[in-house]
Amino acid sequence: MAGLAGSATLAINSRAREMAAEGHDVISFGAGEPDFPTPEHIVSAARSAAADPSNHHYTANVGLAPLRTAVADYTKRYSGVEVGGEQILVTNGAKQAIFQTFAALLDPGDEALLPAPHWVTYPSGIELAGGVPVSVPTTMEARFKVTVDDLDRHLTPSTKLVVFVSPSNPTGAVYTADEARAIGEWARQNDIWVVADEIYQRLVYGTDEVAPSVAAVTGALENFVLVNGVAKSFAMTGWRVGWMIGPPDLVDAAARHQSHATGNVNNVAQMAALEALTGPQDTVVTMREAFDKRRQRMLSMLATAPGVGCSEPEGAFYVFPRVLDLLNDRYPTSAALAGGLLEEAGIAVVPGESFGAPGFIRLSYALSDEDLERGVSRMVAMFGRL
């Protein structure tokens, strides 16, 4: 535990809040959550659930039966995969699903291929399970997407799984159906698992309603684990409801782990998640449209910044610009530059080092239009002085 690093994203957000409390005008681009409130019909369902005594007691560790049914229906609709209740475990957010998946799959010394840039928590989850995270670098020129050839170069007899994320945090990269299929087939041929984090699947921009699911386009679930939840698409990060889907024996192992770690997920939150999955979906569309406009505005503003390069994100709510050409004696790393942005310009960003990609920074556009305009303007001005 002493060697376990804390979340860099949470640390940035904490420092930004401290500065704001001290009276500084701080604009945070660090948040990995929608800035919208949870839709009222979901909140109303939670109020009703809180008043129902049946929700005041322990319930099934694997999740409420109606919610698991709703997860199955939702997965069929948006991931294109048909699953039964025995393949679903409701968890305290998608983060717990990821940790328990690694715990169930990895033995000490097993290697997990981790395309980089990657979310800050994956390496820690792999290491806590006794595994070895193996970074598979991608480039901005390749739109931050890993290929079969990239994976082949890092494949060893110890490789147990590959983490597949589309849309990606932090880059916003979205794999096409053909690209996802190629990776899924490669994993099957090499008898390794695919852990597919689909938490941003409905936050895509363009003609598609959803990002292609690697399990669906590959046509099987026997060596796939799908992780999802209500946090991002329904603005419910604080409700802590996610799930994992996989073969029954793997899900059973994770469920036994959860029975000792936490037990059932908060019942009121589960009922809110049930309403999210089965109720009106128009708020998802509204939020996605707002994010799309902010995405385009941020990209257009960053295009005026000298020394900054950007790959257009196709999903999630992040831009991941390259700032390598801005680094100097004063700011020799992107982490140092992020510190300077916060202390000198009141701008909170997450440095690329946190995602296994030094020389970049992550900007979330999940903030108000006014703050986005003010914040990026400040950033561009500071970059122009470097």
Image (cartoon, rainbow, N blue to C red):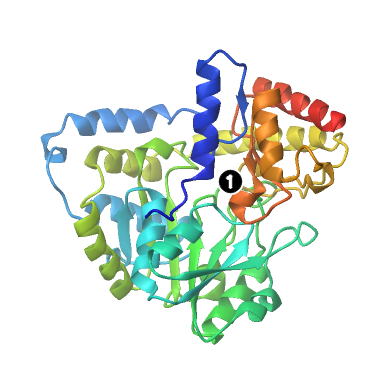
Q: Amino acid at mark 1?
A: Leu
Say which of 18 and 47 sits in front.
18
Q: Is residue 187 left or right of residue 59?
A: right
Residue 220 x/y as whole percent: 47, 76
In the rendered image, the vertical position of residue 243 relative to residue 329, given as above or below: below
Q: Which residue is mark 1?
A: 203
Residue at the spot 67% in from the left edge and 69% down from the top edge: 179
In the rendered image, the vertical position of residue 17 relative to residue 251, given as above or below: above
Residue at the spot 62% in from the left edge and 56% down from the top edge: 356
Q: Residue furthest front?
A: 329
Residue 209 x/y as whole percent: 60, 50
Q: How many marks?
A: 1
Residue 83 x/y as whole percent: 37, 67
Q: The C terminus lies in which quarter of the figure? A: top right
In the rendered image, the vertical position of residue 283 relative to residue 332, given as above or below: above
Say which element carries label 1: loop
Residue at the spot 34% in from the left edge and 70% down from the top edge: 104
* Residue 1, picture quadrant: bottom left
Say which of 38 and 141 sits in front.
141
Q: Residue furthest top?
A: 23
* Residue 31, picture quadrant: top right
Residue at the spot 25% in from the left edge and 58% down from the top edge: 258
Q: Is residue 231 left or right of residue 361?
A: left
Q: Crowdedness of circle 1 by 10 Å Cα count: few (<14), some, many (20+)?
A: many
Q: Is residue 308 visible?
A: yes
* Residue 384, picture quadrant: top right
Q: Is residue 209 visible?
A: no
Say which of 17 and 163 sits in front.
17
